Image: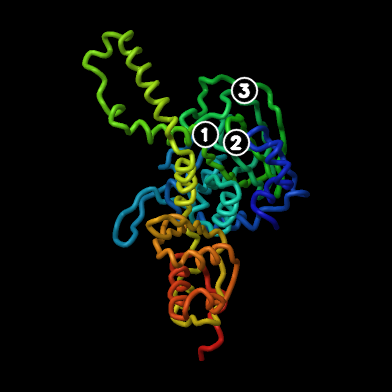
């Protein structure tokens, strides 16, 4: 099927050159394929029947959120009373009355969506998240608005009519959310009826709205939370303003004399400029990249079975890199570090060759490491990497009865 990005946009190179962060794009199912492997209406029914809690579940109608009391209740769980539990019959009552059902954070707990988003964010190196919207016939969930992140709309079922407008605020930051005070957007620059398997890309800042046709519509919204140059520059400035001179308080009575304050500010701007000249771009780049890698949770689907098989491993055991796993190997005078997403392993420098080999190799047997490690050491290392979620056992081996 290709990468997640290719499934969304078709020709990736053309998309990045012509549309990414610039203009919306509608890709039809005849080119992009379908998305029912990620989530189906049957899956939605299954999720609703498990009594999800807010905020994983919410409902909206005509652009306004419903009062949670209309579709949730309290329940007993493990002898404790919990609130905001989805009330399945009332959820469907509200849906029948025209409310859109929103399943939030699917990238955290729905395996197919989790894998799709991880693949997308590893290719883009920007975090991805996913919500599902299920809308009754001829209904509208959200009013015209812009998002402060890029969006891929993946149509799962039914049809939905979309309109996308020119930005009112160009490239809005998270604090620049849509407000009615911004006024009405200009006439649409793109209108499209999304059918199952279609994808609509909307860069951040482009106002949009949608309405379902004469049938239930379901789509998955994949949001890409891009890192901006403002984020990077803020990180660089934060490093230098921690200097003692910038930590000093403003003089007493500063607000009484703005001319004196302006002169002091000019002096400190010059000091800041001189300090920024000493910033090491390589170190800022290292921190920026590390921030992305370290916030990727491990994907541990099937981990209980992996742990049960650890004791049976030997040199004939076949392992492979887990899909979506992170492995960034770095060496410095203090030793070797292996960043595995939200966890970091510190190792002796002598393990650098074997860790770089593992990081670049798709699959192998434990015995393939014989030129780099003795039998006991290679088994210990591979078992540890299985426990940490970097590797998974494909075949435990044939020497055990």
| Along the viewing direction, whichever of 395 and 105 lies nearer the viewer | 395
Indicate which label's residue lies in the foreground, 2 or 3: 3
Indicate which label's residue lies in the foreground, 1 or 2: 1
Marks 3 and 1, how far apart in space? 27 Å
Instruction: Judge the density around disc 2: few (<14), some (14-19), many (≥20) Cα neighbours within 10 Å.
Output: many
Quadrant, the N terminus? bottom right
**Residue at the far bottom in the pictured view:** 401
Instruction: Judge the density around disc 3: few (<14), some (14-19), many (≥20) Cα neighbours within 10 Å.
Output: some
**Residue at the far left in the pictured view:** 252
Residue drawn 65% across the image and 38% down it: 20
Question: Can you tell which mark lies on residue 140?
Answer: 2
Q: Looking at the rendering, which quadrant does residue 43 occupy?
A: bottom right
Are circles 2 and 3 on residues that touch, CB within 8 Å?
A: no
Q: Is tag 2's residue or tag 3's residue first in the polypeptide sequence?
A: 2
Indicate which label's residue lies in the foreground, 3 or 1: 1
Q: Is tag 1's residue or tag 2's residue first in the polypeptide sequence?
A: 2
Q: Is tag 3's residue or tag 1's residue first in the polypeptide sequence?
A: 3
Depicted 328 relative to depicted 378: above or below? above
**Label 3 secondary element:** loop
Question: Can you tell which mark lies on residue 379?
Answer: none
Question: Can you tell which mark lies on residue 229?
Answer: 1
Depicted 346 relative to depicted 56: above or below? below
Question: In the rendering, at what x and y percent does residue 67 appear?
Answer: 43, 38
Question: In the rendering, at what x and y percent does residue 391 appear?
Answer: 51, 68
| Along the viewing direction, whichever of 327 and 3 lies nearer the viewer | 327
Which residue in the protein does label 3 denote? 185
**Label 2 secondary element:** loop
């Amino acid at each position: 099927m290709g990468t997640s990005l290719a499934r969304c946009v078709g020709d990736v190179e053309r998309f990045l050159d012509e549309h990414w962060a610039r203009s919306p794009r509608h890709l039809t199912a005849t080119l992009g394929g379908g998305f029912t492997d990620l989530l189906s209406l049957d899956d939605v029914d299954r999720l609703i029947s498990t009594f999800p809690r807010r905020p994983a579940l919410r409902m909206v109608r005509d652009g306004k959120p419903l009062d949670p009391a209309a579709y949730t209740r309290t329940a007993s769980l493990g002898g404790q009373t919990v609130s905001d539990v989805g009330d399945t019959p009332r959820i469907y009552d509200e849906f029948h009355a025209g409310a859109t059902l929103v399943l939030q954070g699917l990238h955290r707990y729905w395996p197919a969506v989790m894998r799709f988003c991880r693949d997308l964010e590893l290719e883009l190196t920007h975090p991805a998240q996913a919500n599902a919207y299920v809308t009754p016939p001829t209904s509208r969930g959200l009013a015209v608005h812009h998002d402060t992140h890029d969006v891929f709309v993946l149509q799962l079922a039914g049809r939905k009519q979309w309109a996308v407008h020119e930005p009112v605020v160009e490239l809005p930051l998270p604090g620049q959310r849509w407000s009615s005070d911004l006024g009405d957007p200009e006439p649409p620059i793109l209108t499209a009826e999304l059918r199952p398997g279609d994808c609509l890309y909307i860069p951040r800042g482009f106002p949009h709205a949608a309405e379902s046709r004469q049938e239930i519509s379901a789509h998955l919204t994949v949001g890409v939370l891009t890192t901006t140059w403002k984020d990077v520059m803020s990180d660089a400035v934060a490093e230098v303003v921690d200097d003692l001179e910038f930590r000093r308080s403003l003089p007493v009575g500063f607000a009484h004399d703005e001319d004196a304050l302006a002169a002091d500010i000019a002096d400190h701007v010059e000091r800041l400029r001189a300090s920024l000249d000493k910033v090491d771009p390589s170190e800022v780049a290292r921190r920026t990249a590390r921030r992305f890698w370290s916030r990727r949770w491990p994907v541990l689907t099937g981990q209980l079975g992996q742990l049960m098989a650890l004791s049976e491993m030997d040199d004939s055991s076949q392992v492979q890199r887990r899909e979506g796993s992170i492995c960034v190997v770095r060496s410095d005078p203090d030793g070797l570090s292996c960043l595995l997403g939200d966890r970091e392993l510190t190792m002796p420098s002598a393990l650098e060759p074997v860790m770089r080999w593992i990081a670049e190799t798709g699959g192998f047997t434990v015995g393939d490491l014989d030129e780099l490690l003795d039998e006991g050491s290679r088994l210990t290392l591979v078992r540890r990497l299985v426990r940490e979620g970097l590797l998974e056992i494909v075949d435990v081996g044939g020497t055990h009865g």
